């Protein structure tokens, strides 16, 4: 993934715009998108039973799945 943008220029972009940038390979757009949802994901995962290290694995695997899913996301099909 390459970086085409400065994080400050992406702060006012919609999720849909960020996804399109991610699909074009913009790693900064991906980081901005993830950072907006990561607190919620961490909160939800923290409520699951189990060890902290396993919960961290769930979060990491979720982010990897998210990255792969973005590549084929088609908002017009929603």
Image: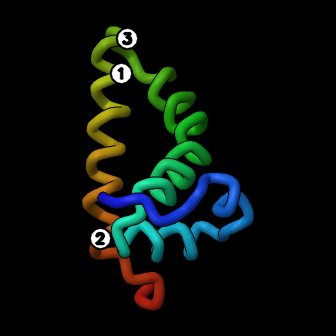
Q: Which residue extends farthest bottom? A: 76
Q: Which residue is mark 1?
A: 55
Specify which label sits upstream in the sequence, 3 or 2.
3
Mark 1 packing: few (<14 Cα in 10 Å), some, or many (20+)? some
Q: Is the C-beta separation of discs 1 and 2 under 8 Å?
A: no
State the residue at coordinates (56%, 74%): 16
Q: How many badges with numbers are in the image? A: 3
Q: Which mark is residue 9?
A: none
Task: Please determine whether, in this image, residue 27 is positioned above or below residue 78.
Answer: above
x then y, percent, for residue 7 = 61, 53
Q: Residue furthest top?
A: 51
Q: Position of residue 18 (x, y in %)?
A: 54, 68
Is 39 in front, or is 7?
A: 7
Label located before the other in sequence (1 or 2): 1
Determine the CA span between mark 1 and mark 2.
Answer: 25 Å
Tell me whether circle 3 and circle 2 mark residues in contact (CB < 8 Å): no
Query: Disc 3 vs disc 1: Cβ atoms closer than 8 Å?
Result: yes
Q: Secondary structure at mark 3?
A: helix
Left or right for 18, reference 10: left
Toward which corner of the image does residue 61 lie, by quadrant? top left
Q: Which residue is mark 2?
A: 71
Question: Which of the two marks, 3 or 2, is nearer to us in this view?
Answer: 2
In this picture, residue 62 sits left or right of residue 6: left
Element class at badge 1: helix
Examine the rendered structure and indicate whether residue 4 appears above or below residue 77: above
The x, y position of residue 21, in whole percent, is 46, 72
Residue ID at (59%, 57%): 6
Q: Quadrant of residue 45?
A: top left
Residue 52 circle label: 3
Q: Residue at x 25, y 60 (%)?
A: 68
């Amino acid at each position: 993934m390459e970086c085409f943008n400065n994080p400050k220029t992406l702060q006012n972009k919609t999720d849909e715009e960020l996804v399109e940038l991610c699909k074009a390979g913009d790693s900064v757009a991906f980081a901005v998108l993830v950072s907006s949802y990561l607190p919620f994901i961490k909160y939800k995962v923290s409520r699951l039973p189990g060890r902290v290290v396993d919960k961290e694995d769930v979060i990491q695997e979720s982010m990897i799945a998210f990255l792969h899913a973005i590549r084929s996301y088609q908002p017009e099909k929603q």
